[in-house]
Amino acid sequence: MSIEGLSQLGFERVQGQSIVDTVRRSRASEAATTGEEFDGVLQAAMDLFNETSRLEHEAHSVQLDYITGRTDDILAVVLAEQRAQMAVNFTVQITSRIVEAYRQIISMQI
C-alpha cells in the first residue's frame, strides 16, 4: 500500500503527528551511514510501534463499548478494527525492513 493510501484510510494525523511523515522520515534515513541517523530511524520505528499499540487499545475500547451496549455504532467498531489491523501490518513491514537493513550492514566486510 502506498503512503498516500494510508492518508485516505484515516492515518493522516495520530496524536498530532502524521504517520505518513514518520514513514517518509524513516525512508529518508534508510540511507543512513552514521549512528545518529540510525538512531533517528530507530526512534521513528519506536514511535510507529507506540502508535500501533494506541490504535489497538482504542479498537479494544470501542469493541467493549459495543459489547456492553454503551454504543450501537457498528461502523465505529469496524473502522477502529481496520485502523488497528492496518497499523499492525504496516509496523510489521517497517520492522522487517529495518531488520533486513541491519543484517545487510552486519554482513558487510570491512
Image (cartoon, grey):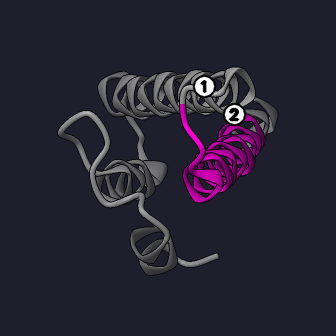
Q: Quadrant of residue 24?
A: bottom left
Nearer to us in this view, 58 or 26? 58
Name the residue carrying label 2.
Answer: 102
Q: Is residue 86 magenta?
A: yes
Nearer to us in this view, 19 or 63? 63
Classify residue 21 as left or right of residue 68.
left
Q: Amino acid at mark 2?
A: Tyr
Crowdedness near tag 2: few (<14), some (14–19) or many (≥20) residues, C-alpha within 10 Å: few
User: Circle 2 — which element?
Assistant: helix
Question: Could you tell me how far apart the alpha carbons at marks 1 and 2 are, in whole angstroms?
Answer: 42 Å
Q: Is residue 59 magenta?
A: no
Q: Quadrant of the C terminus?
A: top right
Name the residue carrying label 1.
Answer: 65
Disc assigned to residue 47: none
Task: Write down the region rendered in magenta.
Answer: 71-100
Nearer to us in this view, 35 or 14? 14
Predominant SS along the magenta part: helix
Q: Quadrant of the N terminus?
A: bottom right
Q: Amino acid at mark 1?
A: Asp
